[in-house]
Image (cartoon, rainbow, N blue to C red):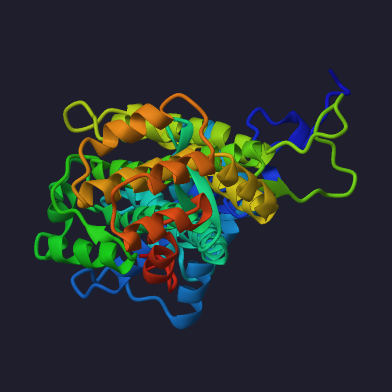
């Protein structure tokens, strides 16, 4: 098929095809080139740490120019260097060894650095490099993408909640008309839920290990028995911005990854609930969707403006959680001191997080298209005066009227009643005049309890707890 399309049109995954533009910032981090960059970063920083240790006299500290050159290698590896790494891997059939050989090639080509070649990957097992590379990758994805996009979504939702805090709305329990609320209060519920889920996501510790083939520093001590390798490696891992895991097998057991993916899934669960409710409010006419010039909603029905952003989010959240759920269940399981089944699974972290990020962006885009239809909200409230039955029977309980619930049930359950019928019932009751007047003045749009106050009290400020990586 010589005329087959190339580029995004030939992508198997929609993350690299249809959704490529929305995930441009993820690609340098979670792609194979990104993984190579993080691996080279770990190799280089390990080499630098060895050179700076006084107990390793065979490797002298690097001068400022050489040090700067070494620190530039990760970015070069993510560009033209990645292709060379893959060429080497075609021979070695080992991806981490290919990275080691590439770094050694670069050192050999720079005057004065060839002496350091055999200290590249010194005493390391591949998993020493891999676990730290993936930890750095996920730390950066969280810092640069997950938390900022979560913050953006929460901020947009909270703003809409505050703007509609006092707008009465008929609520629905079991899909049926229920006690009125306000639109803003219902949106505020989601804003606070997402804020809590965001805090959990931000707080997951990212762990790393650097302890050799089976976690005991065997080779390290064989070469340099006088070096305190535990202290050195702890400082090295913490210097990468990660938390230290001192006790492992050959692999860091990935428990923290499961926690991280579950935290994303918890955020996704709230997003899914939100997307479905917003879809429903659009269906009820409470929201209109702003149109874009030239946009088509249906291939045959010209009038349609479909809630496609919320539907797109729902589908992508499902894919995200399927992948992340599998990773969270799979990665902490490894036979004896190590098996390789985690390796191929780990290559899909960008897939799961990519679908989640795209879904969050779809909800954000959908929110920005919404316009409240206050007339639709008013019509629904006026058409459901029976929701005042709750208020009436509760006031009757206070004043000792016998069987008030049953009285209102017999009048309202399963049938339409008018506001005047309810008022006629109230007029005939033996109640203090103040209570009777208050019930007679009640309307569905004023029977909203503390809904508006709840928004102003608990959503008064920014629901995001902090910015940054944690």
Q: Which residue is more in the foreground, 316 or 85?
A: 316
Quadrant of the frame with the C terminus:
bottom left
Quadrant of the frame with the N terminus:
top right
Q: Which residue is drawn at 33% across and 28% down?
A: 340
Q: Which residue is drawn at 63% across and 38% down?
A: 284
Is residue 24 positioned above or below 71 on the image? above
In x, y percent, where is residue 354?
Answer: 54, 43
Q: Which residue is more in the foreground, 46 or 197?
A: 197
Q: Would you say 385 lies left or right of 370 here?
A: left
Report if residue 226 is visible in the image: yes
Is residue 268 positioned above or below 208 on the image? above
Q: Which residue is more in the foreground, 129 or 165?
A: 165
In x, y percent, where is residue 231?
Answer: 15, 66
In x, y percent, where is residue 159?
Answer: 55, 65
In x, y percent, where is residue 455?
Answer: 43, 64
* Most distant residue in the bottom direction: 64
Q: Would you say 106 lies left or right of 230 here?
A: right
* Most distant residue in the left direction: 226
């Amino acid at each position: 098929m010589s005329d087959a399309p190339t580029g995004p049109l030939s992508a198997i995954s929609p993350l690299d095809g249809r959704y490529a533009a929305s995930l441009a910032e993820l690609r340098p981090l979670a792609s194979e080139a990104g993984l190579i960059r993080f691996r080279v970063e770990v190799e280089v920083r390990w080499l630098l740490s060895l050179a700076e240790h006084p107990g390793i006299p065979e490797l002298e500290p690097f001068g400022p120019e050489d040090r700067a050159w070494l620190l530039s290698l990760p970015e070069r590896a993510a560009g033209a260097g990645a292709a060379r790494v893959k060429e080497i891997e075609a021979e070695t059939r080992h991806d981490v060894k290919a990275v080691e050989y590439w770094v050694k090639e670069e050192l050999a080509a720079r005057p004065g650095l060839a002496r350091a070649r055999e200290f590249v990957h010194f005493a390391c097992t591949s998993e020493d490099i891999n676990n730290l590379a993936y930890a750095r990758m996920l730390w950066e994805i969280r810092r640069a993408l997950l938390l900022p996009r979560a913050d953006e979504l929460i901020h947009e939702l909270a703003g809409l909640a505050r703007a509609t805090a006092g707008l009465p709305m008929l609520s629905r329990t079991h899909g049926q008309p229920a006690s009125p609320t306000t639109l803003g209060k219902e949106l505020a519920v989601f804003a606070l839920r997402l804020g809590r889920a965001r805090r959990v996501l931000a707080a997951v510790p990212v762990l790393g290990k650097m302890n050799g083939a089976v976690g005991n520093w065997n080779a390290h001590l064989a070469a340099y028995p006088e070096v305190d390798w535990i202290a050195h490696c702890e400082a090295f891992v913490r210097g990468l911005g990660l938390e230290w895991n001192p006790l492992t097998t050959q692999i860091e057991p990935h428990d923290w990854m499961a926690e991280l993916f579950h935290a994303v899934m918890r955020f996704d669960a709230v997003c899914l609930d939100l997307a479905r409710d917003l879809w429903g409010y659009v269906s009820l006419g409470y929201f209109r969707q702003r149109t874009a010039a030239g946009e088509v909603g249906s291939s045959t029905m010209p009038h349609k403006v479909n809630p496609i952003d919320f539907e797109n989010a729902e589908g992508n959240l499902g894919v995200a959680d399927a992948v992340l759920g599998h990773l969270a269940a799979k990665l902490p399981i490894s036979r004896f001191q190590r098996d390789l089944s985690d390796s191929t699974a780990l290559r899909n972290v960008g897939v799961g997080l990519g679908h989640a990020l795209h879904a969050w962006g779809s909800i954000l885009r959908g929110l920005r298209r919404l316009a409240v239809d206050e007339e639709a909200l008013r019509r629904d409230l006026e058409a459901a005066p029976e929701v005042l039955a709750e208020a009436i029977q509760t006031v009757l309980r206070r004043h000792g009227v016998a069987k008030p619930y049953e009285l209102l049930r017999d009048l309202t359950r399963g049938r339409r009643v008018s506001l005047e019928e309810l008022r006629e019932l109230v007029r005939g009751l033996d109640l203090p005049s103040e209570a009777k007047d208050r019930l007679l003045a009640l309307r569905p749009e004023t029977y909203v309890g503390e809904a508006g106050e709840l928004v102003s009290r608990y959503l008064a400020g920014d629901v995001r707890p902090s910015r940054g990586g944690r």
